[in-house]
Image (spheres, helix red, strand yellow):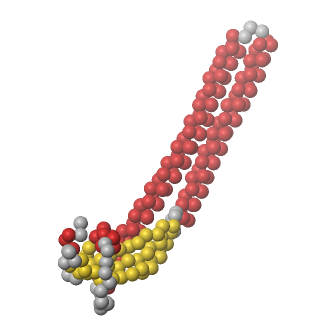
Amino acid sequence: MLEPLLERSGWLRAWKLKTQSFDTEESVLLTGVDDAGQAISDEHCRRLLSLPAEIADPVASGPIPELDRLRDEALAAQLKDVEARNVRYLDEEQLKLDRWAEDLKLGLEQQIRDADREIREAKRASSAATTLDEKLAAQKQIKALESARNRKRRELFETQDKIDAQREELIERIQSQMKQTHDLQPLFAFAWTLVN
């Protein structure tokens, strides 16, 4: 991979990047240029750092403006990646909440349908009753079933309100965590020459 850089020289700079949003992340930004001013990739910089090296005589200052421009580009790309992860996190949390809400809603709706079925069966039984005691007992049962169904309906609406409140809480919590900050500290800079 480093063959194109053989017998060439250049500069490499490193910065420590600390970003804070949902999590605190630390990474190293590397930028490099050859003496012709051509940028070298992050991967090339990492490979150069993995090679054995000898310290040579000190050299004059390198092409700082070009390395700073490359740093700014790398920083923007890194912050964009953090933002993309934040968006994925928000989507995943929203999906979890939606699935949980849907499960609760479906369960309660099924309980209401079951209650409606029981009420219809109790009404049929009441119609088929032949004595006054049987009819009164059936009506009491219908009333109790309707009360239970009505409680389930209220519970469904209350649950939907709780879900909406939890969704708002999730959004507020995520918004407060998404206030992304970053700190960039220089680590080192050096001139390099890659010899065969």
Tell me: 146 left or right of 76: right
Q: Quadrant of residue 139?
A: top right
| Between 27 and 78, the one nearer to me in the picture | 27
Picture coordinates of residue 143 (x, y %)? 73, 26
- Residue 137 vs residue 110: left or right? right
Kindly identify the residue that appears in the image at 20 percent across and 81 percent down. Answer: 36
Q: Position of residue 97 (x, y in %)?
A: 54, 48
Placement of 149 over or under 177, stated as above or below: above
| Nearest to the observer: residue 70 or residue 94 | 70
Residue that protrudes farthest toward the top in the picture: 130
Instruction: Give the camera-side residue of 89 and 97.
Output: 89
Q: Could you say where residue 1 lies in the image, as x and y percent from the top left?
A: 24, 66
Residue 45 in the figure: left or right of residue 96: left
* Residue 73 visible in this rendered orientation of the protein: no
Up/down of 141 relative to 40, above or below: above
Seen from the viewer's position, the closer of residues 31 and 188 is 188
Q: Residue 95 location in percent, x, y?
A: 49, 48
Looking at the image, which residue is at 59% across and 39% down? 104
Residue 57 visible in the displayed image: yes
Residue 97 versus residue 122 in the image, above or below: below
Q: Quadrant of the C terminus?
A: bottom left
Query: Which residue shows up at 32% across the image and 74% down it?
Result: 52
- Tell me the quarter of the picture where residue 132 sits: top right
- Looking at the image, which residue is at 66% across and 35% down? 152
How many tags in the picture? Answer: 0
